[in-house]
Amino acid sequence: MAEKAAVLPVEGRRNVLVTSALPYVNNVPHLGNIIGCVLSADAFARYCRLRGHNVLYVCGTDEYGTATETKALEEGCSPREICDKYHAIHKEVYEWFDISFDIFGRTSSPQQTEVCQDIFLKLLENNWLSENTMQQLYCNSCQRFLADRLVEGYCPTPGCNYDSARGDQCEKCGKLLNSTELIDPKCKVCGSTPCVRDTDHLFLELPLLKEKLEKYIEETSVAGSWSQNAIHATNAWLQEGLKPRCITRDLKWGVPVPHEKYKDKVFYVWFDAPIGYISITACYTPEWEKWWKNPENVELYQFMGKDNVPFHTVMFPSTLLGTGENWTLMKTISVTEYLNYESGKFSKTKGIGVFGNDAKATNIPPELWRYYLLTNRPEASDTLFAWTDLQAKCNNELLNNLGNFINRVLSFIAKPEETVGKLIEQYINAMDKVKIKQGLKIAMAISSEGNAYLQESQFWKLYKQDPSSCATVIKTSIGLVYLLACLLEPFMPTFSKEQLNLCPEEHLSFCDEKGEIEKAKRPWDLIPSGHRIGKPAPLFKGLENDTVNDLRDKFAGSQAERKLRTEVAAQLEATRI
């Protein structure tokens, strides 16, 4: 089979570069990670393709840094072995969720080293870097400096007092920290109390780049319609005052610093991780600069959770601006708040919540998971995952609304009011502005209109009394099914197209140039007369109370507690035998 040609920017077309925050390889991604970055970005990338735009969707695993070294110590293997193991796990999870990456790469590549070191040398040449001595925690027992994630303690932020704050950031309040600020710090490797020692490091002089950065933020946050939580987090950093930011660490697993004095150090993961978007693209195509050094013809959309914002709106653009090169800087940032789990928070480090492999093990189809997470997307405030809510949305919205309408039309084989045309315009307006949850809600409103249209037409009576009118109703309704399959493709890519028996080339693209938006407003004309549909079957199955209660009990507590319950149950079973 011939190798698929790389997607490259095309002159005269709208070229959209989509990135999802690179998931870290220290655990299996949980549902909060999935909706926070890869699934949200996937829905938007699919929508852009539906609109006829030229799209490249880039993601991959973030593999360097302390978290990898810590996980390797826990599992008794090398950092490379950890990365290989969890990269494969992440890839499998995202494939099951039907995430449409153009490339899913990794940051531990030769291209990452090359691009990262080249950017560093340009910053050095342009005098945006400084040297300084900083105090860092040192563990006498382990005989090593403790990188950020190898130390935990109480958060020093007034009113927080979280007892498991990391050396770089508090997971509870989101405050960025230095490890020496922690109250009662402990080494995560041996549990002893570390001491403070001096060590030399390199710093990015953010205060000197302030003028360039603020000009970029002021212009782009408006032009790119940044989400309010992104603007708030960015302004908080600026108002606090930019400070020089350390870009090196005393580690072995990372990109080596190409400087004689610092050759035994590596780059701080939050300096090199965003550069991973670029290096992963370089792994995809040697012509990567056509995407990343082409701001006149490429729009960059970035998706992430709220704790990643300052690194993408302050650190990463400052780094690129400092090189003096013509980089494609982020146009639009879409940020999610937290998806909480039942009565607490999802946590990879503590194993709390439903993880990607857990979702697969429930035997609930990925389309349902995609729908639930996207309709529950925490866009403006935290949202809650609850098994009963999953059940309600499955049974009431998918089964009784969307599934019921489509199955009635396909199994049964006037024009709708102007409402459908207006809803299509509202859908496109919402999705263009990356209001993903609102776009999904509008698409579902068309399904509600379809159900009402079928009910009001009383097609079952028309079938005997007025076959001609019945044919018009069914032709219109089957067009609405097709329209829904297209509008919902970014959210649930495969749910009804197979039953429609249409080849991919026949799908609407909603491309402005083709005039297909106007065509979509005439559902009675969408499916040709005489078209033979596939075999109808119910699209969704309801979730029973017993199933939901069993799943809630199964995934209660941490991963460690679940494992213990399984082992105890196995022992009891063995005793009975």
Image (cartoon, helix red, strand yellow):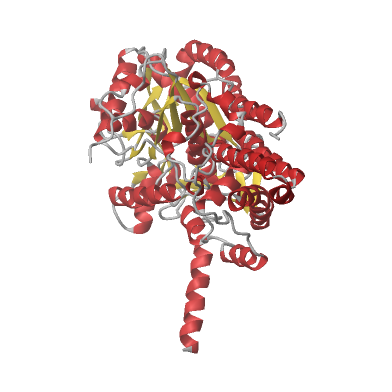
- Residue 5 in view, yes or no: yes
The answer to whether 199 is drawn above or below residue 534 in the figure is above
| Residue 492 coordinates in the image, percent (x, y) | 53, 44
In the picture, measured across the screen, residue 302 lies left or right of residue 249, that is right
Please give the name of the residue rendered at 52% of the width and 11% of the height, measured from the top-left corner. Answer: 215
In the picture, measured across the screen, residue 314 lies left or right of residue 463, that is left
The answer to whether 521 is drawn above or below residue 391 in the figure is above
Task: Say which quarter of the image contains residue 144.
Answer: top left
Task: Say which quarter of the image contains residue 322.
Answer: top left
The answer to whether 171 is drawn above or below residue 77 in the figure is above
In the picture, measured across the screen, residue 244 lies left or right of residue 408, that is left
Query: Which residue reaches farthest right?
Result: 456
Query: Which residue reaches farthest bottom?
Result: 577
| Residue 455 coordinates in the image, percent (x, y) | 74, 47
The one nearer the camera, 267 or 404, is: 404
Please give the name of the residue rendered at 35% of the width and 15% of the height, measured from the top-left corner. Answer: 323
Which image quarter holds the N terminus? top left
The one nearer the camera, 536 or 35, is: 536
- Residue 184 in view, yes or no: no
The answer to whether 330 is drawn above or below residue 571 in the figure is above
| Residue 37 coordinates in the image, percent (x, y) | 50, 38
| Residue 57 coordinates in the image, percent (x, y) | 41, 32
The one nearer the camera, 389 or 48, is: 48
The number of numbered discs placed on residues in the rendered structure image is 0
The one nearer the camera, 186 or 92, is: 92
